Image: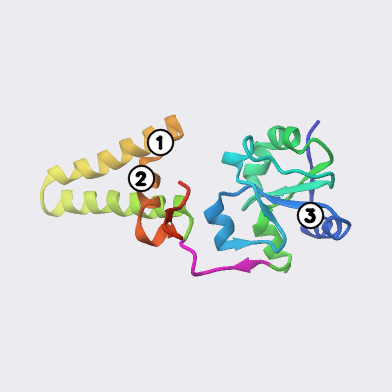
């Protein structure tokens, strides 16, 4: 059995009828932007912190990809009627439906990783071209780190960035 997808308008109607909206994005993503009333249950912690309740559940992520890829797991966790918001919060916004944004929150850790890694690779190439060829090793090191992260599912750069002052919330590091 596969979870049925709902358009933003269909999801909104089901929410008005008592369904519960479950945001499976990471906590830092939810803190920066969310659909009003959505409950945060990050996919990375869903097994340890499953949503509870008798109401039908509508799962969403940013674009709909995470929910589609993990539909079988989400269905098992729901334990009852469950759906996927087709296109995620991006489609919700395109439909003109309300979202809550807190721009004071740092951008998502994985976006910070992408910005940092891209900057370091470009810097390594520029310095290798104009200063000394040894600087190409910086780009190679970052590339190897990204490959390692993809293989193991553990990103050291994300863990280090989570400790940065702008990612600290109430004295605690953001979840990486």
Foreground: 85 or 20?
20
Q: Is mark 2 on a helix, strand or loop?
A: helix
Residue placed farthest to the right in the image? 17
Q: In this view, does 33 lie above or below 58?
A: below
Q: Do the residues labelled 1 and 2 touch (CB within 8 Å)?
A: yes
| Residue in view at x 41 percent, y 54 percent | 112
- Tag 1 residue: 149
Q: What element carries label 3?
A: loop
Is residue 64 rendered magenta in the image?
A: no
Q: Is residue 151 above or below residue 41?
A: above
The disc, 1 or 3, on the residue closer to the chain's N-terminal end is 3
Mark 2 nearby-residue class (10 Å; few <14, some 14–19, many ≥20): many
The disc, 3 or 2, on the residue closer to the chain's N-terminal end is 3
Q: In this view, does 68 lie above or below 169?
A: above
Q: Position of residue 93 (x, y in %)?
A: 68, 64
Compared across the picture, whether 80 is left or right of 24 comes to: right
| Residue in view at x 55 percent, y 62 percent | 32
Rounded to the nearest angstrom, the CA distance separating label 1 from label 3 is: 34 Å
The disc, 1 or 2, on the residue closer to the chain's N-terminal end is 1
Image disc number at residue 157 = 2
- Tag 3 residue: 7
The quadrant of the rendering that contains the N terminus is: top right
Q: Where is residue 70 in the image (x, y as percent from the top left)?
A: 66, 36
Q: Where is residue 52 in the image (x, y as percent from the top left)?
A: 75, 43
Give the residues in magenta.
99-106
Foreground: 121 or 31?
31
Compared across the picture, whether 58 is left or right of 164 comes to: right
Mark 3 nearby-residue class (10 Å; few <14, some 14–19, many ≥20): some
| Residue in view at x 81 percent, y 60 percent | 12
Q: In this view, does 144 lie above or below 136?
A: above
Q: Position of residue 50 (x, y in %)?
A: 68, 40
């Amino acid at each position: 059995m596969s979870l049925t997808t709902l358009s933003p308008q269909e999801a909104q109607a089901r929410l008005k009828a008592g369904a519960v909206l479950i945001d499976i994005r990471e906590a830092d993503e939810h803190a920066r932007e969310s659909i009003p009333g959505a409950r945060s249950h990050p996919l990375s912690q869903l097994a340890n912190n499953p949503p509870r309740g008798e109401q039908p559940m509508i799962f969403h992520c940013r674009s709909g990809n995470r929910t589609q890829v993990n539909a079988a797991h989400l269905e098992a966790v729901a334990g009852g009627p469950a759906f996927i918001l087709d296109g995620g919060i991006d489609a919700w916004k395109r439909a003109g439906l309300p979202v809550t944004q807190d721009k004071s929150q740092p951008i998502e850790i994985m976006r910070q990783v992408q910005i940092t890694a891209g900057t370091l690779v470009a810097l390594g190439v520029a310095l290798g071209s104009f200063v000394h060829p040894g600087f190409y090793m910086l780009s190679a090191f970052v590339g190897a780190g990204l490959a390692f992260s993809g293989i193991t599912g553990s990103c050291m750069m994300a863990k280090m960035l989570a400790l940065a002052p702008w990612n600290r919330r109430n004295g605690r590091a953001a979840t990486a």
